[in-house]
Amino acid sequence: MLTTVCLTGLATTAPADAVSGSRVTAGAGIALDEARSQANPRHRADYDDEFTIHQLGTVLGAGVRNRAIARSTGCSLERPCRSVALSFQVVTATGAARLNASNTSSAVNDHCPGCQTFAGAYQFIVSTPYRFTLTQATRNQLAVYERRLGALERSREPIGTVKNHADTLAAEVVSLLQDAVANTPHGPAVNSLNLRPTVTLRRHID
């Protein structure tokens, strides 16, 4: 599901073994994030969450990737496993004429009857034609959401409930980012091709 919003409504990547982080080189920004969990008979409950903010600044283009991977392996129906991976990636970029975004999730039960396995990847991209940075107040609120995400992925609620809470949290993040963009003074545009600020959510669950 992809929803792009220009300050009006709802709007959210990483290869195997990637290390979370971001960098800007020669005008190109890169952001990578991944949450990965794996449950098995020796470790029947496993959880991982990422909530990362990347402020790329002014860039010509950006490649951003976010991924959540959850796997349950070899548990029995009598002693099932539970594996939950949730990754929230927030990226801000100014003047990016080209944006390559990837957001994926994968949840696998491998010979694991009755196991609960859930992966959710949520990618939030804020693109503006003028210089934009998150205020400390906005970052403080995002930190509150980060703590809520950590509590959610460790909860023992049914997977359907976890998914619903994750969606609700994502909607709150979008609303916060929309307000942050709307309330930022608009300076001169650094890229005349990108005339409107956008808040975009990419959501993939499995």
Image (spheres, helix red, strand yellow):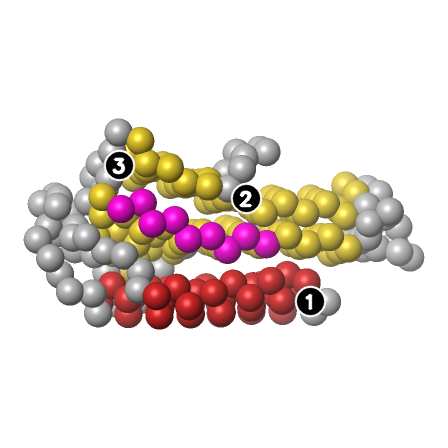
Q: Is residue 156 visible?
A: yes
The reply to whether the C-beta atoms of the residues labelled 2 and 1 are less than 8 Å apart is no
Residue hosting label 1: 155
Q: Over which residues does the magenta segment extend?
A: 49-57
Q: How far apart are marks 1 and 3 (CA)?
A: 38 Å
SS label for mark 2: strand
Which residue appears at 54% of the width and 44% of the height?
34
Which residue appears at 22% of the width and 36% of the height?
60
N-terminal label among 1 and 3: 3
| Magenta run includes residue 54 | yes
Which residue appears at 11% of the width and 57% of the height?
187
Q: Residues within 10 Å of mark 3 (few under 14, many from 20)?
A: many
Report the side of 40 relative to 195 (left or right).
right
Towards the viewer: 24 or 85: 24
Q: How far apart are marks 2 and 3 (CA)?
A: 21 Å
Report the side of 162 relative to 116 (left or right).
left
On the image, the x and y values in percent for residue 170 come to 46, 64
Residue hosting label 2: 34
SS label for mark 3: strand
- Asked where in the image residue 30 lies, by quadrant, the reply is top left
Which residue appears at 29% of the width and 33% of the height?
28
